Image (tube, rainbow, N blue to C red):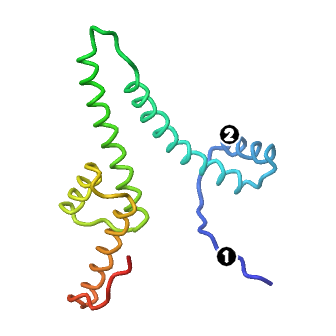
Amino acid sequence: MSKVTEQPQMKIRLSSELKALIDAAADANNRSLNAEITTRLEATFQSDKADYEGGVLGTLKAIAAEEPPKTLRGTWRNFKEKMALGLRHAETLNIWKDAIKIVGYTPPAAVSEGIKAMIFAEKIEPQHVIMLLQAMKEAEIQQKDGDPMGDAVPAI
């Protein structure tokens, strides 16, 4: 017999109405109850991301692309500049959050703010942020392991 890889399990409480809805959906989609719940949960996370990226950011980008009436051009240009700045901040945060998630390491606050400022100013590419965080993580591990001189070169 082959050994099946174990996946985490959890118990949850549902109202009988919600359980009936999930059962009906699972039957309609030819899925097991577990597959139906998993599919629906994964879809909500994708939807959340799409809502943010398509919804909020999409709306801001659409507004920033519009042309105003002549009487509002100066004000509109000011508004568009601020909108672009806001979009850049949002993109910076997305790059930062993704890099932290990929590497699994968050540097001290002052260092984090410095790196975010470099991302915002487009002085560092996203892939270099990941490499920098990996090197910092390796250095911190070496320091904790009693290798303060860093004899082993961090893998970048």
Q: Mark 1: give few (<14), some (14-19) or many (20+) Cα within 10 Å.
A: few
Q: Is residue 41 left or right of residue 97?
A: right
Farthest-out residue, top: 71
Farthest-out residue, left: 110
**Disc sitting over residue 98 in the figure:** none
Residue drawn 38% across the image and 76% down it: 156
Mark closest to the chain's N terminus, 2 or 1: 1
Mark 2 or mark 1, whichever is nearer to me: 1
Of the pair 63 and 94, the residue shown nearer to us: 63
Residue drawn 34% across the image and 38% down it: 87
Q: Which residue is mark 1?
A: 5
The picture places residue 11, in percent across and down from the top left corner, at 60, 60
Q: Give amino acid for label 2.
A: Glu
Check the picture and name the quadrant holding the N terminus. bottom right
Are the residues tagged 2 and 1 within 8 Å (C-beta)?
no
The picture places residue 116, in percent across and down from the top left corner, at 26, 54
Q: Is residue 108 left or right of residue 7?
A: left
Q: Mark 2: give few (<14), some (14-19) or many (20+) Cα within 10 Å.
A: few
Q: Which residue is mark 2?
A: 17
Asked where in the image residue 16 lies, by quadrant, the reply is: top right
Q: Secondary structure at mark 2?
A: helix
Q: Secondary structure at mark 1?
A: loop
Residue drawn 37% across the image and 62% down it: 100
* Residue 65, placed above or below residue 122: above
* Residue 92, placed above or below residue 142: above
Q: Give amino acid for label 1.
A: Thr
The picture places residue 17, in percent across and down from the top left corner, at 68, 39
Residue drawn 55% across the image and 42% down it: 47
